[in-house]
Image: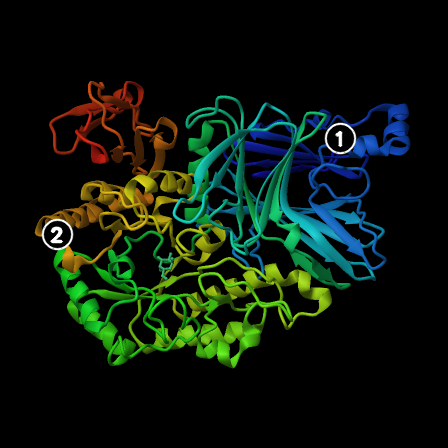
Amino acid sequence: MAIKVCDEKKIFQINTPNTTYLMGVVKDKYLGHMYYGPRMEDCDGLYLLRAPQGEKADHFLYKKNKIGFMDSFSFEYPAWGTGDFRDTCLKVRDERGYDTCELAYEGYELMDDKPALTGMPATFAGKEPAGAAQTLTIILRDRLIGLKILLRYSTFEDSDAIIRSVVAVNEGTQKLYLEKILSACLDMDDENFDLITLHGCWGRERHTAVRRVSIGKHIVSSLRGESSHQVQPFMALTTNGTNQKSGDVYAMNFVYSGNFIAETELDHQDGVRMSLGLHPDTFEWVLDPGASFETPEAVVVYSDKGLGQMTRTFHNLYKNHLIRSKYLHSKRPILVNNWEATYFNFDTEKLVAIAEEAKKLGIEMLVLDDGWFGKRDNDESGLGDWQVNEEKIKGGMKSLAERINGVGLKFGLWFEPEMVSPDSDLFRAHPDWAIQVEGREPSMGRHQYVLDLTRQEVVDYVYESVAAVLRSANIEYVKWDMNRSLTDLGSLALDREHMGEFSHRYVLGLYQMQERLLNDFPDLLLENCSSGGARFDAGMLYYSPQIWTSDDMDPIERLSIQEGTAMLYPLSSMGAHICVCPNHSVGRNTPMETRAHVALAGTFGYELDLTKLSEEDKEKAVVFNKEYHKYNDVVREGDYYRIASYQENNMYDCWQVVSPDKSESLVTYVQVRFETMRKSRRLRLEGLEPGAIYQLEGTEQTFSGEMLMNAGYLQPMLHGDYNSILLHFVKKN
Ligand code: GLA
């Protein structure tokens, strides 16, 4: 059994294949965090709680100086108000206006399963026995206000991740107002940690940032209504010198797509508290007597083998227990998207011409992006009017899909369902459906407003208008976009008391729409997107097996973007396309091979005007498409290793995937800068079978796995900047 409880000592031990998590109760009351680290069978670690011993200490510390105890104890789930002045996870106000809360241990439950969450994405058990799940629920209670708190911890037999969520149940007689309820906390001792987070902006998402954890609070958060370009709902604490292969890592990632806060606090007593959850600044929830509230899930991972192992734990968890799409384990169709090829300037004939060219090159799907509906000739109008613009698409969507299918390609379509343009029939009919504060003109972003998804009639209307288009034609793929942050947070339909629920309710409305879409169109391949990668998070991955990583497709920019994204998310989930040169975002010229090699690390496709490609580039495209079919199985299903980072060395980048049976490995090397007189680069590979012999495809060269991993492969310099190479090692029988 993965989870063990010592009833007598009130110790809880959660074991995963390689890790152990320990909690204990002191004074029959306070639940404390004891240990998180390498797996142990011994759980007798109550001393780790530093609980006051003996009668005197007892009297002094629990009574006369309770604050001293409360402010230093390693709480498993700290609550605000009775002496813990660090970052706490829970703040509840009662009808009288008091906001103190004191949680006492009450009991626990164990189940051999993993409960789903209501209306939210959640990890799930996989195929047994490897995917079997267990869940421990610890029950805490504030007796005065009648608040019951359930702390849930789930594990899967095949994963080192622990999944946490919290439920608050009002078992009292008065209304309670939840003002802060985070999903997970780790209360540890300082170990001179570094903090790793992922940051960026439009076109530069998820660059890795490392900082020293010094005294005080370190907060990363989003208040934009989406997980955001700016920061990823993730933080990792690492011990000194941690690298890809060694060092301790404590990481948290949020299975959520809206506002969040991730906090790390180093306090004056050398305690380090790390927590993650819904951002309290845009959150309040009314709990009527008898009602309950469930937080989103947080994934917690410990690795004693550096960041590489943390990454693979996240990847495997998401592949085996979160991404539920039937396309997860299949090659996705190679697509061509017309956005950067035409922007808003297209018609049926242009699209068919692109499709015909695509077919000749081995591309499998045409995706029609923004501009096919309403009056949408630029980004100033039309959002919300999801009726085909027959001036551009003569004969309508069915006819276009038939023509594309007739060429031999699948057909996919772009939507931005959450938005409305002020210049649209929808807005003219329902101005109150936009998110707004009564009497204040809402701020626009990209000339558009956001629809109020907290209102069921809005969700129903928008969902139906999207579904009607999908029913009208053979549309096999949808790109669901979202192109601005949320402001003017308010709904004309929510009363004063419930207005604080707005931000979370918006996300629940979004999840409801995506859930319905998948239920009604079970064969649909869904790709989420948000101005590039502003909503690349574990929440959206529950609905779509792939997410558009960034609008910037320049392969050099993509190195850091994809490195940061792949730190958490499987390569099979990263939308990646070959762009035209000079690149539209940064104006850089790069070899087509490099653009292709970088895009082959993701879902793969094209975003350029194929009718304008030179004959030479067309020939290359044929080769890349064959390479996609040849390598995608190992890219999609393999284990990922980060070998070198351009973000760190400013010279070159290298990553590797190894098939689960270790019979083949694909290494991608990108030499950003060429320098004369440099020796060849030594690439120390990972994950191979030490005793096996591998042949480098296209050569007679053979190497033992051991040699490639310890001595390394010597990659000669490639002449010129921005060059790249794929190295395919295949095990000889
Ligand atoms: C966003 C997306 C792009 C494209 C445009 C269309 O920016 O990220 O890929 O779909 O919208 O307006």
Amino acid type at image mark 2: Lys
Vertical placement of 703 versus 123: above or below?
Answer: above
Name the residue that disc number 2 marks.
Answer: 618
Badge 2: how crowded within 10 Å, few (<14), some, or many (20+)?
some
Q: How is the image coloured?
A: rainbow
- Residue 130 visible in image: no
Name the residue that disc number 1 marks.
Answer: 72
- Residue 247 visible in image: yes
Q: Is residue 608 left or right of residue 585?
A: left
Query: Who is closer to the viewer here, 367 or 105?
Result: 367
Q: Is mark 1 within 8 Å of ligand 1?
A: no
Residue at image point 52% right, 56% down: 121
Residue at image point 18% right, 63% down: 354
Vertical placement of 344 versus 640: above or below?
Answer: below
Asked if the residues shown at circle 2 and circle 1 are in contact, with their CB atoms under 8 angstroms apart, the answer is no
Query: Who is closer to the viewer here, 114 or 558?
Result: 558
